Image (spheres, grey):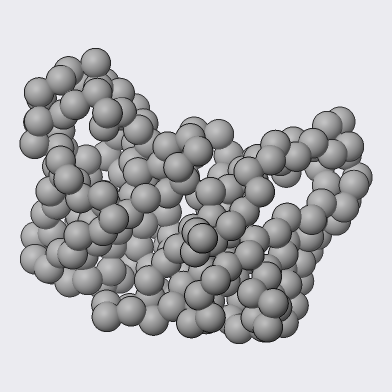
Amino acid sequence: DVKVTQSSRYLVKRTGEKVFLECVQDMDHENMFWYRQDPGLGLRLIYFSYDVKMKEKGDIPEGYSVSREKKERFSLILESASTNQTSMYLCATHTDTQYFGPGTRLTVL
Amino acid sequence: QKEVEQDPGPLSVPEGAIVSLNCTYSNSAFQYFMWYRQYSRKGPELLMYTYSSGNKEDGRFTAQVDKSSKYISLFIRDSQPSDSATYLCAMSAKGNYGQNFVFGPGTRLSVLP
C-alpha cells in the first residue's frame, strides 16, 4: 500500500508567520503534488514536482513556494501566512492514479 | 464550461438504496478515470480506477465510463451509513510530466439509517 504522510493534521498560525508543511511518501514515486481544498472550490493544484529539485507551478502558486531536496519529501512553504490561506492542504503522489495524504487543516489567525 | 462537472449535492438516501453518482467532462484526451471517497476532515482515498471505457466492479461499487458521451458514473449497491462521505470524480490525461489530473468538486452523500 502506498503511504503518504503529512507532518501535522491541524495547525494554527498567525498572520505573517512562515509556515512549513511537510509530506513524505514511501513508494519512490517521482511525482508529488500539493493541493488546497476549500468548500465550493474543490481541489486546486498549488505546485507539483516531477523530480528532486524540480518543480512546476500549478493553478494557484501565488503566496506559496515548495522544496524537494529528497525524492520522498516534498515541502510546501507559506513565506508570510495570510488569513486567505486558511484551508485544508493535501499532498499527493501518483503513478497512474493519485494517492493522498491525510491532509493538514491550517488556520491562519 | 468547466473541464469536469459534478453535482455537489447533498444527496440523501435511505440505507439499502442504490446510489448513482455522475460526472461529465469536456476533454476527450482523458484516459484514466477515478473515484475517490473523502470522509470529513480526512484526505481522499481511492475507491475505483478505470482505464478508458467500460465497467469495473468491486464489491458493492461499480464504475462506468462512457467516453463517447464523456460521462462517468459510480454506483453503490446496498448503501450503508458508513458510505456517507463526499465522492470526488477525477480524470487524467498525459502531460509533460506524467499524468495531468482534474477533479470534480465532489458530491456529498448521506445514507440515512
- The location of residue A61, given as percent across then percent down, is 20, 50
Q: Which residue is drawn at 84% across and 39% down?
A: B13
Looking at the image, the residue that sits furthest to the front is: B1
From this view, report whether residue A18 is shown above or below residue A30: above
Give the side of residue A60 with respect to residue A1, left or right.
left
Q: Which residue is drawn at 15% across and 41% down?
A: A63
- The location of residue A19, given as percent across then percent down, is 15, 33
Q: In which quarter of the image is residue B16?
A: top right
Using the rendered image of the protein, determine whether residue A101 is visible from the camera's viewpoint: no
From this view, report whether residue B11 is shown above or below residue A12: below
Using the rendered image of the protein, determine whether residue A89 is visible from the camera's viewpoint: yes
- The location of residue A103, given as percent across then percent down, is 39, 41
Q: In which quarter of the image is residue A31?
A: bottom left
Q: Which residue is drawn at 55% across and 34% down?
A: B40
- The location of residue A28, given as percent across then percent down, is 28, 70
From this view, report whether residue B11 is shown above or below residue B98: above
Closer to the camera in the image, A29 or B75: B75
Give the side of residue A66 with respect to residue B71, left or right.
left
Tell me the quadrant of the picture where the C terminus of chain B can be found. Answer: top right
Give the side of residue B84 with respect to residue A7, left or right.
right
Q: Residue at x 13, y 59 (%)?
A: A68
The mark tally for this picture is 0
